[in-house]
Image (cartoon, rainbow, N blue to C red):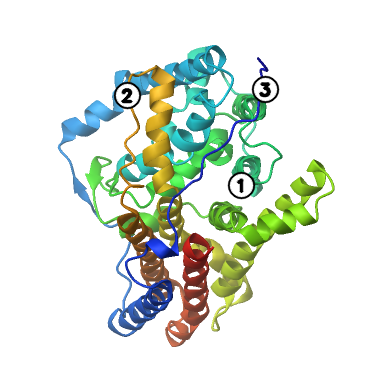
Amino acid sequence: MSRDPSLAVLAHGLGGSTDLPIPFTYALIGAAWTLTFTFAVVAFAWRKPRFDPDKPAHPLPRWVTTVIDAPVTRWAAALAGLLFAVWVAVASIIAPQNADNPLPGVFYVLLWVGLVALSLLFGPVWRAISPIRAVHRLLGWRSLRRAYPAALGYWPAAVALFAFVWLELASPNPGSLGAIRIWLLIYLGITLAGGLLCGPRWYGRADPFEVYSVVVSRLSPWRRDPRSGLIAIGNPFDHLPSFPIRSGAVAVMAVLLGSTAFDSFSAMPAWRNFVDDNSTSTLTATVIRTTGLLLFVGVVAATFWLAAIATGGVDRRQRRELPGQMVHSLIPIVIGYVFAHYLTYLVERGQQTIILLFGLDAEVNYVLSLHPSLLATIKVGCVLAGHVAGVIAAHDRALRLLPKDHQLTGQLAMMLVMVGYTFTGLYLLFGG
């Protein structure tokens, strides 16, 4: 049997506009009105900033922090992540080299989508379970002590994240075992080399999965209390602005949001027909899909950037800084789109992956697919909740950053962009 067959990657979500319990047009109009109403309420009733990363949270008992920070706990989490990675590698080799191989499911479902759920529930978990960090610690590497260039910021992670979504959405054969293995080997080589050169700081800036986990964790209720350093629970909106403002942060968000939108768009018959009609070879089709993916990412980056700087009363330096200072408001939108788009994929294909990975004698429970109206309602709710949270986060940040005379007018462009994101997201998710 061939060692490198094409493996079909299952659809990310099931259901369409016909599964909505209300007409699709009503859902679009209702979502737009909800955002507009939310903006009107916060604009006139929310006159002072309320969210502050330095605001005290509610610390848990000290023993909780002691257990979590204990070396044995840290080592146990790191070794568990490393052993799981080794098992996935072994299972992908000894399993049938066809659709029954668990590697694509682990790569596209457990790693990409499951990481979002874990990071939202427990914080930046990849930092604790990263097999690369575990290898670094086991080998006792001493970096060459070259400082990580501050100008790079999150750009390495943005490039790596784009490489991931390119493999899934634009490459000739995203389900190929060989393609996934090559991607992972390149990822391991570059990430380990960067860690050896620049130390552990490289992982927090360049590892795409760690940066992704950190992004999502900013909406988690768990964090460190700024006064005591204890593990605490608090308002996620206070934690949200703590996302580090670094070069490349907008690019990271644009890749995450734009790729999800392109995923929906690429499933539309009109796009598929366009690719087929204008492709003379596999290379041509790949170039067309890559161009489409780049266009979606670029549109998200450009529209957000322009909306963030479209205000008066600020000098040139502050205007340049505004996109980075406002970028955390995209985090709820990214999370909302991920769950709206990939929830069925996570729950149902995730079960299948676990069954294949561990050889379990069990069947997949298609709990969501069997209730399409409920699934469609959840999808709309995720998109809408993400945008409402984004509007609130952006408004509060604008109150802290913009001059008083421009605190309202300076948000209008951002509000229009978010309404546009909502319309586009729901249309691509259901209308296509």
| Label 1 element class | helix
Q: Residue 205's quadrant in the figure?
A: top right
Q: Is residue 78 visible?
A: no
Q: Position of 248 compared to 408: left or right?
A: right
Residue 379, compared with residue 179, is above or below; it is: below
Q: Residue 324's quadrant in the figure?
A: bottom right
| Label 2 element class | loop
Q: Position of residue 144 (x, y in %)?
A: 64, 24
Q: Position of residue 318 (x, y in %)?
A: 57, 71
Q: Which residue is mark 1?
A: 158
Can you name the residue that lies furthest to the bottom here?
A: 405
Can you name the residue that lies furthest to the right here?
A: 280
Q: Position of residue 427 (x, y in %)?
A: 50, 67
Q: Position of residue 61 (x, y in %)?
A: 15, 37
Mark 2 vs mark 1, CA separation in Å: 38 Å
Q: Are marks 2 and 3 in contact (CB under 8 Å)?
A: no
Q: Measuring 59% from the left and 19% from the top, which residue is drawn there?
A: 97
Q: Measuring 48% from the left and 14% from the top, which residue is drawn there?
A: 138
